[in-house]
Image: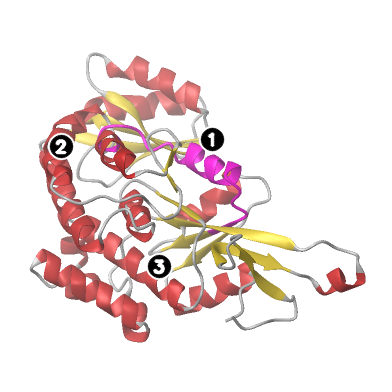
Amino acid sequence: MASTAAGLVERDDGNGRAAPGRVCVRPPSVHAGLMAPVTMTIAFLFPGQGSQTVGMGKAFYQTSPGAKAIFEEANAALGFDLTRLAFEGPDTELALTANTQPAVLTASVAAATACAERGLKPALTAGHSLGEYSALVVAGALRFADAVRIVRRRGELMQDAVPVGTGAMAAIMGIELAAVEGVCAEAAQGEVVEIANVNSSLQIVIAGHRAAVERAVGLATAHGGKMSVMLPVSAPFHCSLMAPAGVKLAHELDAITVTDPTIPVVRNVDGGVTRRAQDVRPFLLKQVASPVRWTDCVQRLAGEGATAYVEVGPGRVLSGLVRRIVNGARGQSVEDPAGVDRALAAVGVGA
């Protein structure tokens, strides 16, 4: 690994090997006895549906042999040219849930592969909704070819669980979780409207029957919510209306091989840590119809020792949320090779 003026060394794992995702930064003043070395523990964050853009991953495909191989493996696993769809669109086709999920997964894993080629690797990881599959692939718990097939089927099942137009989602801004839960209870009136994502203390997404979600948006505004808006999605993800999709997804997950992750993966359902293969399937199934507790995920990463947060894949939403969840934390986003350069500089790894 190249050295910089900071005096960089990879932290040893105790067995004479460099510990992945941990870098010891030695400022120049260390040599004068003025400052102790600082160990940076890197957490990778993987985005979910909604982060997709036409062209995502193309720069990595063109510059990284490993990233190119990931896109080609996705094409072979799915039996169609996902690479063309990701790079050329059209946007309307890419936005279809059954296409979006494998495309975002592929772009994210390709980006992580390109990061690894440059020496940027995580010590622990998490992903938002769909992104949890990316995290499990990078942690070695799922084979990429299996994961890309699974998430395509996941997208189909989630879309089919509720007739188009019946469900909806909305972002509620500016009021706390307990208040949003109260709004949902008041708005339900015999229908489903539930917490779907807890993205930060004041950014909460709800999902359920369209009329109930619309009532909740109105009530949230009356309770002081700011910029609460309906979201342009095709189904009410991460609420109890998705339960039928979870039942059918179980058959898909039972058919694949799962192994122990090589690094801890913080999961969406409860903010707990998956360290064993036996925990992978049940929590992925529960995730389909349960809220994404992203605030808990990031706080758990911090509790596990994360000091550097790198969003890997399309979009920059998660790196922005980190600053709202962990005081003093800064997130880096890696969407292209230039993003890798910036992340390497930020965490103190020589290029």
Using the numbered discs, state the Cα–Cα distance from disc 3 to disc 1 in whole angstroms.
Answer: 29 Å
Dot 1 or dot 2: first in sequence order is 1
Q: What kind of residue is marked 3?
A: Ala
Q: Which residue is mark 2?
A: 245
**Few, some or many residues within 10 Å of mark 2 (<14, 14–19, 20+):** many
Residue 37 falls in image quadrant: bottom right
Residue 287 falls in image quadrant: top left
Dot 3 or dot 2: first in sequence order is 3
**Few, some or many residues within 10 Å of mark 3 (<14, 14–19, 20+):** many
| Residue 213 percent coordinates (x, y) | 29, 29
Up/down of 57 relative to 192, above or below: below
Horizontal side, residue 349 vs residue 117: left or right: right
Q: Which residue is mark 1?
A: 201
- 1 or 2: mark nearer the eye: 2
Residue range corresponding to the magenta coloring? 287-309
Q: Is residue 161 magenta?
A: no
Up/down of 347 relative to 337, above or below: above
Q: Identify the secondary structure beneath mark 2.
A: helix
Using the numbered discs, state the Cα–Cα distance from disc 1 to disc 2 in whole angstroms.
Answer: 29 Å
- 3 or 1: mark nearer the eye: 3
In this view of the protein, can residue 264 be seen by the observer? yes
Q: Which residue is mark 3?
A: 112
Q: What kind of residue is marked 2?
A: Ala
Q: Identify the secondary structure beneath mark 1.
A: loop
Q: What kind of residue is marked 1?
A: Ser
Q: Is residue 288 magenta?
A: yes
Residue at 18% x, 47% y: name it.
154
Horizontal side, residue 188 vs residue 79: left or right: right
**Few, some or many residues within 10 Å of mark 1 (<14, 14–19, 20+):** some
